[in-house]
């Protein structure tokens, strides 16, 4: 009665089932790796945001590459804003997904080095994209700024193309090496997303805190894939039993028909 398993149809069904089981197991393992990565990232971000602020020059220097462990660390700096040489970063969105600019202002430290400060988001309400937008002035004189340390933006990491031929004082990426060449100054590696002092009128709109990645979703996907992999052999057995039952019923019906006397 099990010879039907050697038919072309059932051989294909069995091979597909055998392929699906390890594939689903591997997909579950991959989702668990993503769960571990996201959990580690969330823990790292939480630790960085919870750490006490430190002077920025303890974390970075000219030419320094901000590491993953340094990202989001709260830092402070003393100096003055150089608003005359600030630029805007194109195609950036706020918390409501509105497109506008980030305001990138050089901050000259007391020793002459420059720290790039992302002062926040402003709307793209200029008459055209080639017009430099109106930006509220930063605090004048010597001030202390606090912000979250961020690595330089690159096309490889962000997916944003570093377009050339942009209007004056507009850039696509926040990159300390690029700004060092433009400013002709010693620029600290990376930049900070300003958190204090807050602007008097709420503009520029400060960059919000980074949110947690949904690691639990990856965990749920992993369990789901493993349940699917367990369900494949169960489904295969159910199909075999159903096929066997149908064949037995068909054979019984045929025997009954043959046992009945022919009509006169």
Image (tube, helix red, strand yellow):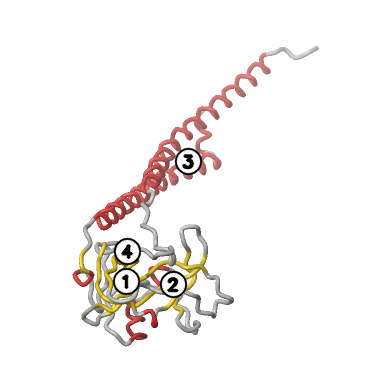
**Crowding near pointer 2: few (<14 within 10 Å), some, many (20+)?**
some
Q: Please name which of the two marks, 2 or 3, marks the residue nearer to the observer.
A: 2
Q: Which residue lies furthest to the left in this view?
A: 58
Disc ID at residue 196: 4
Q: How many discs appear?
A: 4
**Crowding near pointer 3: few (<14 within 10 Å), some, many (20+)?**
some
Which residue bears the numbered disc 2? Answer: 136
Residue 253, quarter of the rendered image? top right
Residue 260 in picture, x, y percent from top left: 69, 13
Q: Is residue 107 above or below residue 67?
A: below
Question: Does label 4 or label 1 sit earlier along the sequence?
Answer: 1
- Describe the element under mark 1 as helix, strand or loop: strand
Tag 4 near tag 1, CB within 8 Å: no
Which residue bears the numbered disc 3? Answer: 14
Residue 9 in picture, x, y percent from top left: 55, 41
Cα gap from disc 3 to disc 1, whole angstroms: 57 Å
Question: Which residue is at 30% across, 76% downward?
Answer: 141
Cα gap from disc 2 to disc 4, whole angstroms: 15 Å
Cα gap from disc 4 to disc 1, whole angstroms: 14 Å
Cα gap from disc 2 to disc 3, whole angstroms: 69 Å
Q: In this view, does 66 lie above or below 43?
A: below
Q: Nearer the viewer, residue 188 or 235?
A: 188
Question: Does label 1 or label 2 sit earlier along the sequence?
Answer: 2
**Crowding near pointer 4: few (<14 within 10 Å), some, many (20+)?**
few
Which residue bears the numbered disc 1? Answer: 191
Question: Which residue is at 58% across, 77% downward?
Answer: 128
Which image quarter is the C terminus in?
top right
Image-based side of 180 in relation to 217, left or right: left
Q: Is residue 229 above or below residue 261?
A: below
Question: Which residue is at 32% across, 68% downward?
Answer: 192
């Amino acid at each position: 009665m099990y010879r039907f398993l050697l038919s072309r149809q059932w051989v294909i069904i069995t091979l597909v089932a055998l392929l699906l089981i390890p594939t689903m197991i591997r997909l579950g393992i991959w989702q668990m790796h993503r769960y571990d990565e996201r959990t580690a990232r969330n823990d790292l971000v939480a630790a960085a945001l919870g750490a006490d602020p430190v002077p920025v020059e303890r974390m970075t220097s000219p030419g320094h590459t901000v590491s993953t462990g340094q990202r989001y660390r709260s830092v402070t700096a003393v100096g003055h804003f150089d608003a005359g040489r600030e630029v805007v970063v194109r195609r950036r969105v706020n918390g409501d997904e509105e497109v506008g600019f980030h305001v990138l202002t050089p901050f000259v430290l007391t020793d002459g080095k420059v720290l790039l400060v992302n002062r926040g988001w402003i709307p793209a309400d200029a008459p055209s994209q080639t017009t430099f937008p109106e930006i509220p002035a930063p605090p004048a004189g010597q001030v202390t700024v606090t912000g979250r340390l961020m690595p330089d933006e690159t096309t490889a990491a962000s997916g944003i193309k570093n377009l050339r031929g942009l209007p004056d004082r507009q850039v696509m990426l926040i990159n300390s090496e690029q700004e060092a060449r433009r400013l002709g100054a010693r620029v600290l590696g990376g930049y900070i997303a300003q958190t204090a002092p807050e602007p008097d009128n709420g503009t520029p709109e400060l960059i919000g805190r980074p949110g947690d990645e949904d690691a639990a979703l990856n965990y749920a996907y992993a369990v789901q894939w493993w349940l699917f992999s367990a369900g494949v052999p169960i489904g295969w057995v159910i199909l075999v039993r159903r096929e066997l039952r149908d064949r037995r019923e068909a054979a019984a019906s045929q025997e009954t028909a043959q046992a009945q006397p022919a009509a006169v």
